Structure formats: structure tokens, C-alpha cells
Image (cartoon, grey):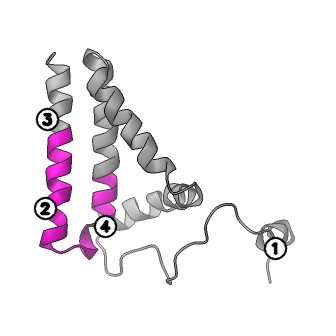
Amino acid sequence: MASPEHEDEQRRPGPGRPLPPGDSLFTPGAGRLRREVERRSAVPLVWLHQRPRWLPPAVLGALFVAGLTAPGWLGALCLLLVVVSFLWLAFLTWPSLNRQQRIPRILMVSVVLVLAVARMLGF
């Protein structure tokens, strides 16, 4: 039985889309680092899942365009935020990917990282 303070939350439908089917958000048999990253990522991932589908790619696209157009360190910072987002999502999905699915993620992170470094160096 749910505690009285959480009873209200269980009856109310949550905002956004329902969570995908499955028993767990965590990788079975994962090492300590992966378990910790997955545990800390659970709340942000659920929050992102509840936003409209177009919002996360739109924000990353806006950061990417801002990174390409903003001068110097500001542009580099925007691009680094894109890199960190890509790395985070790639890390979380890595165990379920095959080689053909991993290569584009590596290339994408590498290209945006090179662009960020070029921005920092003034190119």
C-alpha cells in the first residue's frame, strides 16, 4: 500500500508520454561506473522523455548553430555542451549497440569536438 503522501501522485497521470515498456532503466550486470551513471541519469532521462519529442533535438540543434555562429569561447562552450550531451547519450546506449551503430556516434562526437577546439583556437 502506498503511503498517504504519495497516494495523490499515483492517481494523477504524469505529464508527457508514458515510459517505454520494460522492467528496468538499468543494464543488468553492469560495472560500478555504468551503474552509477545510469542511476544518476534516470531522473533526467525521465524528465526528457516527458517533454515534447521535438524539444531535445531542437535545443541541441540551436546549441550547435549557436556554437558555429557565436565568436570564440562562447561558441566553443555551446559546442562542448552538444558534445557532452552526445557523449552522455552514447554512453547510456553503448551496450545495446553493434559496431555499425557505434561508428556514427563516434564520428559525430569527434566532428563536433574538433569544431569546438577550432572555435577555442579562434578558427
Please tell me which of labels 2 and 4 falls first in the chain.
4
Marks 2 & 4, CB-CB < 8 Å contact:
no
Q: How many residues crowd mark 3 within 10 Å: few (<14), some (14–19), many (20+)?
A: some
* Range drawn in magenta: 87-112
Q: Which residue is mark 2?
A: 103
Tell me the kind of residue under disc 4: Thr
Q: Position of residue 11 (x, y in %)?
A: 81, 73
Marks 1 & 4, CB-CB < 8 Å contact:
no
Please tell me which of labels 1 and 3 falls first in the chain.
1
- Give the secondary structure at mark 4: helix
| Dominant secondary-structure state across the stretch colored magenta | helix
Q: How many residues crowd mark 2 within 10 Å: few (<14), some (14–19), many (20+)?
A: few
Q: Which residue is mark 4?
A: 93
As rendered, which of 90 and 104 lies closer to the eye?
104
Q: Which residue is mark 1?
A: 11
Q: Which labelled disc corresponds to residue 114?
A: 3
Q: CA distance from mark 1 to mark 3?
A: 49 Å
Tell me the kind of residue under disc 2: Ile
Q: Position of residue 20 (x, y in %)?
A: 52, 76
- Give the secondary structure at mark 3: helix
